Image (tube, grey):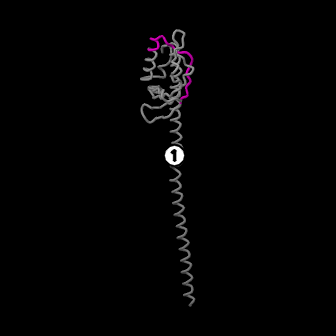
């Protein structure tokens, strides 16, 4: 092989090596760029999701707490109303409205007509089972186990509570916002389901 031919072959090999290295470098840069772009896209939604989810959860938790506070407020004021046989002088209307308030007022009227009032206190275990903060008004559902063992109907100083009465039963309540305030708007007593 002549010196010139030998030089040409060596130049071609060097050129090929440089091209291979350049192609390899380009491929590496493209892969790196694609990875970093993919990483940015994959990180963005996942890092945003927990924040949005946490915010949603905290709003639902706050709404549930407010709904449960309204339920407990209604329970406390209802006990006071049944002690005296009327709702006047209580803050019942601050916690109950619509059908819930009508049902309580109707029962109070019937007991008052019969000369019945209540002594003692029922025990309640209540929890929020559903919250909807996307609707207007916002809504929540309460599930309560009501224990009336210590809750006695009295007439003329005599205990007239029925001995066969179910003393522990479930109550399901509907609570919603009225303006900015949560109020109990309805409830269903289910004495067929002991708790």
Query: Percent x, y for residue 159?
Result: 54, 14
**Residue at 42% across, 34% down:** 135
Mark 1 — residue?
49
In this rendering, the count of numbered labels is 1
The reply to whether the magenta stretch includes residue 65 is no
> Is the residue marked by circle 1 packed among few (<14), some (14-19), or many (20+) residues within 10 Å?
few
Q: Which is nearer the eye, 164 or 132? A: 164
Q: Residue furthest top?
A: 156
**Residue at 53% across, 15% down:** 118
Q: Which is nearer the eye, 40 or 189? A: 189
Q: Which is nearer the eye, 12 or 155? A: 155
**Residue at 52% across, 49% down:** 46
Query: Percent x, y for residue 86?
Result: 48, 13
**Residue at 52% across, 14% down:** 160
The reply to whether the magenta stretch includes residue 111 is yes
Query: Percent x, y for residue 41?
Result: 50, 53
Which residues make up the magenta segment?
110-126
Label 1, secondary structure: give it: helix
Q: Residue furthest front?
A: 164
Query: Percent x, y for residue 162?
Result: 51, 18
């Amino acid at each position: 092989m002549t010196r010139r031919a030998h030089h040409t072959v060596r130049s071609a090999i060097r050129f090929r090596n440089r091209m291979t290295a350049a192609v390899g470098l380009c491929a590496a840069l493209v892969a790196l760029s694609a990875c970093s772009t993919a990483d940015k896209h994959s990180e963005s939604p996942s890092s945003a999701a927990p924040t949005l989810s946490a915010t949603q959860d905290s709003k639902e938790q706050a709404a549930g707490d407010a709904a449960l506070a309204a339920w407990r407020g209604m329970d406390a004021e209802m006990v006071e109303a049944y002690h005296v046989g009327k709702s006047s002088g209580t803050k019942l209307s601050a916690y109950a409205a619509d059908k819930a308030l009508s049902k309580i007022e109707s029962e109070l009227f019937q007991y008052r007509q019969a000369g019945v009032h209540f002594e003692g206190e029922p025990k309640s275990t209540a929890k929020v089972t559903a919250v909807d903060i996307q609707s207007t008004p916002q809504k929540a559902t309460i599930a309560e186990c009501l224990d009336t063992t210590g809750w006695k109907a009295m007439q003329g100083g005599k205990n007239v509570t029925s001995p066969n009465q179910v003393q522990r039963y479930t109550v399901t309540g509907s609570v919603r916002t009225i303006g900015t305030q949560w109020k109990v708007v309805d409830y269903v007593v289910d004495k067929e389901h002991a708790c």
